[in-house]
Amino acid sequence: MGTGTVGGVTVVVKQTDTDSSVALIQAAGQRVLVVDDVLATGGTARAAVSLVERLGGTLYGLAFLIELDFLNGREKLAGERVTSILHY
């Protein structure tokens, strides 16, 4: 994982064997929408929410293309605005 700041934008890069994610988060005081392809267990989304809060941003909500309902990831995001387009 690497973190850096470029022109007031904090860039966080996470690399795994099967996936690469990049998050761009504006400086403190900005409203942030977290967008990801899949909501599964909710761990990555919860970590993204924590990062936004740690950097002084305000979470607007979370949006996902696919939600795997049987994994109950939404439970880890209780109290947050969560939108998913497809449910499996």
Image: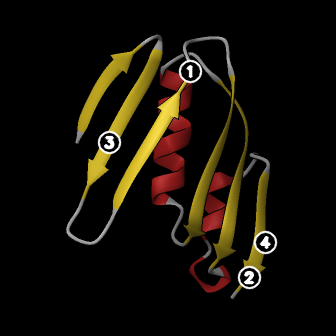
Label 2 or label 1, whichever lies nearer to me, is: 1
Tell me if mark 4 has few (under 14), some (14-19) or many (20+) residues whose alpha carbon lies within 10 angstroms of its own: few
Tell me if mark 3 has few (under 14), some (14-19) or many (20+) residues whose alpha carbon lies within 10 angstroms of its own: few
Which amino acid is tagged 1? Gln
Q: CA distance from mark 4 to mark 3?
A: 25 Å
| Residue at the spot 68% in from the left edge and 69% down from the top edge | 65
| Residue at the spot 56% in from the left edge and 26% down from the top edge | 53
Which amino acid is tagged 2? His
Q: Is residue 60 left or right of residue 53?
A: right
Q: Are marks 1 and 4 in contact (CB under 8 Å)?
A: no
Label 3 or label 2, whichever lies nearer to me, is: 3
Q: Picture coordinates of residue 27 (x, y %)?
A: 54, 14
State which tag comes first along the sequence, 1 or 3. 3
Q: CA distance from mark 3 to mark 2?
A: 27 Å
Tell me if mark 1 has few (under 14), some (14-19) or many (20+) residues whose alpha carbon lies within 10 angstroms of its own: some
Q: CA distance from mark 1 to mark 3?
A: 15 Å
Describe the element under mark 4 as helix, strand or loop. Answer: strand
Q: Which residue is mark 4?
A: 85
Q: Which residue is mark 1?
A: 26
